[in-house]
Image (cartoon, rainbow, N blue to C red):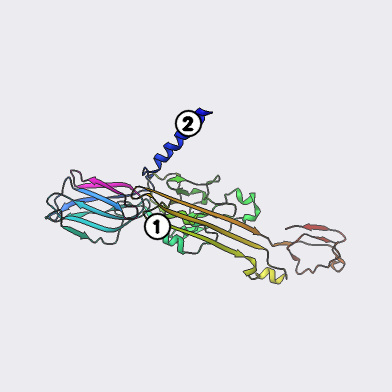
Amino acid sequence: MVFGRGMLVCVLLMFAALVSIQVHAQVTGATLSGTVTDTSGGIIRDAEVSVKNTATGISRAVTVDSAGFYTVPNLLAGIYEVRVTAAGFSTALQSDLTLAVGAQQQLNFSLRVGTATETVKVTAATQIELTSSTLTGHVDSQTVLDLPLNGRDWTSLATLHPGVNLIENQMDYSLGSARGNRGFGAQLTVSGQRTTNNNYRLDGVSVNDYANSGPGNVIGAAVGVDAIQEFSVLTGGFSAEYGKATGGVINAITKSGTNDFHGDVYEFLRNSALDSRDYFSRSGNTPVAAFRRNQFGAAAGGPIIKDKTFVFGDYEGMRQAKGITTTLRFSIAGNLSTLVCKLSRKISIRCGWITNLARRTLCSERICLTTRT
């Protein structure tokens, strides 16, 4: 028993030590690359390129190679400040450089002759990926938070991009296992491919469900919007490093803490008391089916050690109760005027359609039909 406890303590300490190590999967980290030259176009060897994340203060430095080329891989998505220094040249500074999840951004520098104490601020043009032929779209964190989402399912925002459509003729979730055979997550078709030909990634890990469909709970929503920093939608031409998809790739990353404390507490409510009756409820003179949904939670993040170690946590809960209105079509032989319910209640029949909200028994001389909802 003592040995077991000792092993558990060692494992926990090793995990705590690994928390502060910055590790990003190749498909989630952005890559910044480019060349460093002088004003005449000559390459500058051994120049130093420093890349700093303005939110966390974490910086990385690389040295330009003999061909004047540099590359900084596996950068966490965010806003960066890039500084280039070389002996005998002025310092070049590029601020507010935004790197998206999985992006491959090219940024070239041309240094002027001068002293290292002189700083030349570089204003970059519109950022265009010149090193990749991938057809991709990007959904940032502000878009994720601002746009209304029914059920707070972040994967539904993928339909903002061309070539991505939501299949809306799937079986209803109320049918239980019948819908579950195709998966409960969002059914998205990308570039005309089947919904099971997509790959959903979260922090570099595939999160497809058992049916190889999108992630989702029993009501079809992938919750945790407040924990999603941003995601990209790859619709074609992506490299083999993503894999497992002939349709598209939805590549998302979660938030991490920064040098500032941020958090929120939320509650989203839907209630049938605020709903109007639809056409079938009005024509059948039936009340609105009961519907109550509460989505609530909290998210918070901040620094443990400034510029080094950060923490972020998110919790989201959902409670839902939903009644279902069922419409049945049937034929009854015999004299309809003598149709009387066993509960001694007359039932009005119009065009052979009856809408039920509770258990009733329909009777005649030749047929007895029990309906339940």
Residue 222 in view: no
- Report the span colored magenta: 54-75
- Circle 1 is placed at which residue position? 137
Residue 252: where, in percent of width, then height? 43, 52
Residue 287: where, in percent of width, then height? 71, 68
Q: Quadrant of residue 109?
A: bottom left
Q: Amino acid at mark 2?
A: Met
Measured in 3D between alpha carbons, the distance from the residue under mark 2 to the one under mark 1, in whole angstroms, is 46 Å
Mark 2 and mark 1 residues within 8 Å of each other at the beta carbon: no
- Circle 2 is placed at which residue position? 7
Query: For the residues carrying marks 2 and 1, which lies nearer the camera in this image?
Result: 2
- Quadrant containing the N terminus in the rendered view: top right
Residue 66 covered by magenta stretch: yes
Q: Nearer the viewer, residue 58 or 209?
A: 58
Q: Residue at x 72, y 68 (%)?
A: 286
Q: Secondary structure at mark 1?
A: strand
Residue 40 covered by magenta stretch: no
Q: Earlier in the sequence, mark 2 or mark 1?
A: 2
